Image (spheres, rainbow, N blue to C red):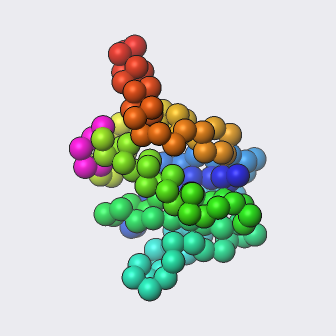
Amino acid sequence: MIRFILVQNRQGKTRLEKWYGGYTEQERQKLKAEVHRTVASRDQKHQSNFVEFHNNRIVYRRYAGLFFCFCIDTNDNELSCLEAIHLFVEVLDAYHGNVCELDLVFNFYWVYAVLDEMFLAGEIQETSRSVILARMDQLGNLE
């Protein structure tokens, strides 16, 4: 199960967060700071994209200046989660061209809609890029 999803920039500013557990606001702030310290300090060339973290595991991927971080259970498949991160970025790229931090800030409603299309209650729901984009087109037609 996915515990939470964070997208943070290099300075530690959270641009997207989705929580699938009962965390208080104080716990959330603490976790966001700890995740950023852990992920930003790692060597991208010589260390893996998986980190043990509070009896869970952080799976992350860096795209340009953004860290896409998923906190998952230790018994979940890290590679499928890494693939889900890449699919999420591909879907965002398909909509925005080359997604950047400002796209996440100014189109947050669309980004959360994509996130909700792909993940449901902390589990990967949809893995087909074409299906996700078709649903987002349908959503766009409703506006």
Residue 70 percent across, percent down from the top left? 57, 58
The magenta segment is 95-99
Q: Is residue 21 left or right of residue 135?
A: right
Using the image as rendered, state which of residue 11 and residue 6 is in the foreground.
Answer: 6
Considering only vertical position in the picture, is 12 above or below 104?
below
Q: For the stretch drawn in magenta, what is the main secondary structure?
A: loop
Residue at image position (70%, 52%) is 1
Q: Does residue 136 appear in this view?
A: no
Tell me which corner region of the image, top left, top right, bottom left or bottom right, holds residue 44.
bottom left
Residue at image position (72%, 66%) is 74
Image quadrant containing the C terminus: top left
Considering only vertical position in the picture, is 105 above or below 54?
above
Considering only vertical position in the picture, is 143 above or below 77?
above
Q: Does residue 125 appear in this view?
A: yes
Q: Is residue 63 left or right of residue 36?
A: left
Using the image as rendered, state which of residue 102 and residue 73 is in the foreground.
Answer: 73
Q: How many marks?
A: 0
Residue 99 percent across, percent down from the top left? 30, 49
Question: Given the current orientation, which residue lies at the most extreme left position?
Answer: 97
Q: Is residue 42 left or right of residue 105?
A: right
Residue 30 percent across, percent down from the top left? 64, 63
Residue at image position (46%, 74%) is 40
Considering only vertical position in the picture, is 110 above or below 6?
above
Residue at image position (31%, 46%) is 93
Residue 103 percent across, percent down from the top left? 31, 44
Question: Given the current orientation, which residue lies at the most extreme bottom position?
Answer: 46
Please tell me whether residue 59 belongs to the stretch shown in magenta: no
